[in-house]
Amino acid sequence: MVIAVSGKGGVGKSTISALIVRYLVEKKSKPVLAVDADPNNTLGEKLGIQVDCTIGDLREDAMKNKYDAPAGTPKQRNIEYQVQEAITEGNGFDLLVMGRGEGPGCYCSVNNMLRAFLEDVSAGYRHVMVDNEAGMEHLSRRTNAKVDLMLVVCDATPTGMMTAKRIGNLARELGIIQGKIGLVINRALEPVTPDTALEATGLELFACIPEDPQVRAFELQGKALTKLPAESPAVAAVNGLMAANGF
């Protein structure tokens, strides 16, 4: 199953992504692959693991070295080896960071090789959780995987709702949704009714995640959100969201 989380910067989508990974691991829905597809990658920090290599790094290295590989090693196989090394093992999950976008050169060949291999990698996991950038370019460009659950994250402001509407429309236009798409309002200070959410965004309201001082404290201290107590309001809300969607 492919779960994708999207939203404009600053709404807490990486926080929700980390809590989704936590939920899947606790439910023993392994193996889980977490993909940080946001160029401003912070998912590793929220999951409490250090990332030393990204797909963007590999792509840049491949361009600079003209796909150099050991004698007798095909270009595709060499890239596969490097991508395997870029996968960071966590406690019950693996993390792959996409990193920065392309530079000024032509990346068509290496991107095609990466795309094909990432599809093969994803097939080996029970769940793939993608923390996406707002425009979803990484998801649409890097893989052809269909999304089983798309969560569009926003805050309760008019600007946040409008952005969520645009993201939802883009997701449908890309044709990547094969399952469900819904709205998640994060850091909600008060409940938002399903009718209000639907009118503002055109999306079904899946959940309101309450403002949670414990999450803020953990993030300020650089602590992994996987260590949040079970009674954390945000943890409970994300757990309920995932359970309601059959996970």
Image (cartoon, rainbow, N blue to C red):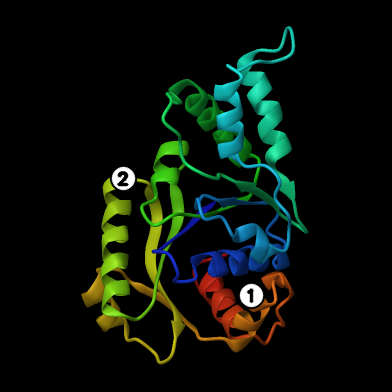
Q: Position of residue 230 (x, y in %)?
A: 70, 82
| Quarter residue 64 falls in | top right
Residue toward you, 76 or 67? 67
- The residue where tag 2 is placed is 174
- The residue where tag 1 is placed is 219
First in sequence: mark 1 vs mark 2? 2
Query: Does 176 sit above or below residue 227?
Result: above
Left or right relative to 201: residue 216: right
Outermost bottom residue: 190
Residue toward you, 202 or 189? 189
- SS state under label 2: helix
| Quarter residue 201 falls in | bottom left
Residue type at mark 2 is Leu
Residue toward you, 99 or 177? 99
Whole-number angstrom distance, CA of label 1 to CA of label 2: 33 Å
Q: Position of residue 126 (x, y in %)?
A: 63, 49
Q: Residue at x 71, y 27 (%)?
A: 81
Q: Residue at x 63, y 75 (%)?
A: 219
Left or right relative to 47: residue 193: left
Q: Position of residue 42 (x, y in %)?
A: 59, 60
Using the rendered image of the protein, determine whether residue 9 is visible from the camera's viewpoint: yes
Residue toward you, 64 or 225? 64
Query: Does 104 sit above or below residue 152?
Result: above
- SS state under label 1: helix
Counting the numbered discs, the total is 2
Residue type at mark 1 is Glu
Left or right relative to 203: residue 82: right
Quadrant of the frame with the C terminus: bottom right
Q: Rate crowding at label 1 as few (under 14), some (14 to 19) or many (20 or more) other CA atoms within 10 Å.
A: some
Q: Residue at x 54, y 69 (%)?
A: 16
Q: Of tags 1 and 2, which is closer to the observer?
A: 1
